[in-house]
Image: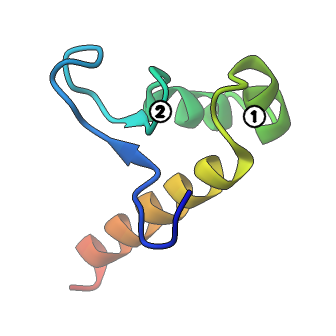
Amino acid sequence: MAAGESPVHCLAEIMSGPPVFVGTRVPFETSIDYLAAAQPRTEFLEDFPTVSKEQAIAALQQAKEALLRCVDP
């Protein structure tokens, strides 16, 4: 993943548009579901090998930043 490149994107032609990891058909929501179920990130990465560790971390960081902007504009 290149610097400044988003780890996820939304394209209508990929699964009708939900955020998915770039280069995959894996919904970002799936990674959140794993965290909510207290499953380790390593398990998510094993189950979805098309998602890199760097993508998973960058996507969570991006989500965190978006939420913090809502709380502290």
- Per the rendering, the mark at residue 10 is none
Q: Is residue 40 left or right of residue 60?
A: right
- Per the rendering, the mark at residue 23 is 2
Q: Nearer the viewer, mark 1 or mark 2?
A: 2
User: Where residue 57 appears, x then y in whole percent?
Assistant: 64, 56
User: Where residue 7 appears, x then y in whole percent?
Assistant: 47, 51
Element type where label 1 sits in the image:
loop
Please give the residue where the numbered disc 1 appears in the rendered image.
38
Residue projecting furthest to the left: 12
- Vertical relation: 34 (above or below) 3: above
Element type where label 2 sits in the image:
loop
User: Where residue 27 appears, x then y in whole percent?
Assistant: 44, 26
Return the residue nearer the eye: 40 or 10: 10
How far is disc 1 from disc 2 in space, using C-alphas?
A: 26 Å
Return the residue nearer the eye: 73 or 3: 3
> Which amino acid type is shown beneath numbered disc 1?
Ala
Please tell me which of labels 1 and 2 falls first in the chain: 2
User: Where residue 55 appears, x then y in whole percent?
Assistant: 59, 50
Residue found at x 67% / y 55%: 54
Residue found at x 69% / y 42%: 52
Q: Is residue 63 left or right of residue 44?
A: left
> Which amino acid type is shown beneath numbered disc 2?
Gly
Residue projecting furthest to the front: 2
Split into 4 quadrants, where in the image is the N terminus? bottom right
Residue found at x 75% / y 34%: 38
